Image (cartoon, rainbow, N blue to C red):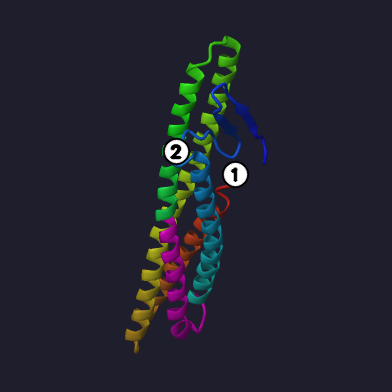
Amino acid sequence: MKNIVIIILTLGTTILIGKSIFAPSAQAESADTAYNALARTENDLRKTVASAAAKARRLQERLGSEDRHTALPKDVEEFLDTTHRLDALRHDLTADIARLAAASNRTLIAFDHERAAITDPITRHAMTALRTQARQQTTDRLKQARKALNLLTRVLIQGSDVAHAAHCVQLAQELNTSGQTLEERIRAATEEARRYATLTNDLLGRLTTAYTE
């Protein structure tokens, strides 16, 4: 584990800096537990985003293919299944962010209580610097997670629009027994649906790299 600093205070409280910070009590959820929950959700999100991106690309390609009349419904259904999974993960991510924020606040309060009991000014100054580092680390972690949450929300909105647009194209094709005007409208609508699928796929790509920027 990178950049781990463990300090045992005079009252026996252990403070862990690196992956998470502090452990104020056994009753309340620790920041470490909350961090691990967030990391698990983010890992599930990465895998699901990769699957959703592949299905968005397939849907985009299908909208421009000759067999879209027969194959499009299945591709739309698979894409919707993945977006439903992303929606569930959005709820999990929202809850995990709130849990980590609350747990971090509790541990900082516990830290401040221990720091206030230190009489040596040099040690107390060192603990103040340690608190600043720990708080900034958690702030950055939450900012990163919230950025991903915002992107995910945009993906879900656009993904829903893509699916509805693809369904509209499909239904219009069923009505198009003949007529040049309607055929032209269908082509224009299909291109618009493909464009939106491209935008959705671009957002999914941004979401994939949100944790590496």
- Quarter of the picture holding the N terminus: top right
> What range is drawn magenta here?
64-90
- The residue at which mark 2 appears reads as 103
Disc 1 is placed on an element classified as loop
Disc 2 is placed on an element classified as helix
Residue 117 % position (x, y): 49, 16
Q: Residue at x 41, y 38 (%)?
A: 102
Seen in the picture, residue 189 relative to 67 is either above or below; the reply is above
Compute the Cα span from label 1 to label 2: 25 Å
Q: Residue at x 55, y 38 (%)?
A: 20
Image quadrant of residue 126? top right
Residue 25 % position (x, y): 46, 35
Amino acid carrying mark 2 in the image: Ala
Looking at this view, name the residue that lies furthest to the left.
Answer: 175
Taking depth in this image into account, of 166 and 83 the one nearest to the observer is 83
Amino acid carrying mark 1 in the image: Glu
- Quarter of the picture holding the C terminus: top right
- The residue at which mark 1 appears reads as 213
- Count neighbours of disc 2 (C-alpha within 10 A) and say few if under 14, some if 14 to 19, many if 20 or more: many
Q: Is residue 40 magenta?
A: no
- Of mark 1 and mark 2, the one earlier in the sequence is 2
